[in-house]
Amino acid sequence: MKVHVFAATTKGPVQIERITREAAPISQVCLGRTTSVLPISSDYDDFVRQPSGVIERVLGPFEPGGFRLDASGEIGDGNSWQLPVLVAHALDRAGRLAGPGEDAGATLWITGTVDVDLRVGEVDFVGEKLHATREHFSSRVAKKCPVTLVVPAANLEDVADHGIAGVEGILGVCNADEVLRHVGLEPVTVPATGALQGTGDLVPLATGPVRLPRWRLVAMGISLLVFAALGTFLLLLPDLPPGTTFRDCDVCPEMVVVPGGAFVMGSPPDEPFRDDVEGPKHEVMVAAFAMGRFEVTRGEFTSFVEETGHAGENSCFVRIGSGGRLDTSKSWRDPGYPQGENDPVVCISWNTAKTYAAWLSEKTGQTYRLPSEAEWEYAARAGTRSPFHVGQTITSDQANYNGTSSYGEGERGVYRKRTLPVGSFAPNEFGLHDVHGNVWEWVEDCWNDSYRGAPRDGSPWLSGNCGRRVMRGGAWGSHPKNVRSAKRARYILEYRNYNFGFRVARSVGQ
């Protein structure tokens, strides 16, 4: 039985019509029936190429480039195309992918990310994708080609919220093997190390070494020389002892020097309320740097606005009952609850946080920036591996969060429903205050659904979904599970919320 495969998009379903092997530029894939080559995602490398690429580990290497994907429309630049493309590859290998105009016994409507262990990850905009597909469902049913919706298990609630008619069933999956079994293919075993072994028609095509293109080898060599030169330069700079606090100007945030070192980033699989996006755990080496001792305050931000004339964005998303809305009468000046000059500034977008850091840099002659995600977690943990720097649980006497629920064996506490002045609670071992709760904090990194391929040198991850940036630390309205050291969230660059703030970082020795 042949199968039609459709990748779900917010503009409607896009049929994956044909897959052929051919050279394609790195991080690109051919789309449509033309000769044009369009970028599909900056995650293409991790998804396709060895040693970590899902497609190559399942179906063998693509030498020297990638594959051509003929589709009925543009899939887009997100990551939810990964699962449908993987399934289409498997069906094509078995000779069962139905092309345009071909009869098929089944139709799959698929959305989802997939990592090297074939785990399927949660995606955004499932409701919008379903809405854009309703007419398509009825037409497929009329042709007696039953439709199965395939979504990540984490998105099943999104599907349940929409009355879906004309489908045979809804398949919520945690692993790509479940989709393969559904269409009668043998599952694939993807080991963490060593040669890939599988069964049935999905045994890899090649076992030889992968030869990198010459240009890529040259680029790697240049990168190594640059990093070596940079490391030598930094060694010549004067060091500031860890724990040193300083200000570069009267209205600048107070900074504290964080010592360099290695740490294990991410959460273990048995940590309560762990999200898949918090893994896999991996060791990261972080160089010494300075980080804001506190979140940037209203007073500090006011100085920026008064000196630059920056509007500070006069609207903010506020909570109303169980929902919320964008309120044009609210802003960092009035987020809807009382604040003092020493409260953290809120209603701040990623773009504005970057503008503030650039102003500090110009004002002081130093290089201010947002911390990388790795720097943030390293500094927040301060040498600990527990969910919180204070231990296995946390109380509202140690941080400002929604204390109406507890974490682990901890106790319930108070819910203050507003920010508190920075430094209201004891710092961690690195001298940082409020890394748990008070306000969510923007960091530099683009969003990625896992740490597969993440930098291990403490630098920001600047590929992936860069239209969404990472936030850390939780806020005053967060339940304790969301103020853990490993908790990750992502939002669009322009989004402003009444519990969104930030803190800054800069290099030491300058």
Image: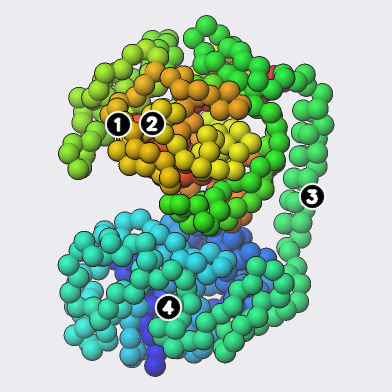
Classed neighbour count for the residue bearing mark 2: other residues with Cα under 10 Å, few (<14), some (14–19), many (≥20):
many
Q: Quadrant of the C terminus?
A: top right
Examine the image and state in which quarter residue 351 appears. top left
Residue bearing the label numbered 1: 415
Residue bearing the label numbered 4: 179
Residue drawn at the location 26% of the way across and 65% of the way down = 159
Residue 293 versus residue 123: which sits nearer the camera? 293
Residue 354, given in percent of the width and then of the height, sits at: 48, 28
Examine the image and state in which quarter residue 314 appears. top left
Q: Earlier in the sequence, mark 1 or mark 2?
A: 2
- Measure the alpha-carbon separation of dots 2 and 3: 51 Å
Residue 254 versus residue 183: which sits nearer the camera? 254
- Frontmost of labels 2 and 3 is 2
- Measure the alpha-carbon separation of dots 1 and 2: 8 Å
Residue bearing the label numbered 3: 221
Residue 469, given in percent of the width and then of the height, sits at: 45, 42
Q: Earlier in the sequence, mark 3 or mark 4?
A: 4
Q: Quadrant of the N terminus?
A: bottom left
Classed neighbour count for the residue bearing mark 4: other residues with Cα under 10 Å, few (<14), some (14–19), many (≥20):
many
Hey, what amino acid is under mark 1? Tyr
Label 3–label 1 contact, CB within 8 A:
no
Label 1–label 2 contact, CB within 8 A:
yes
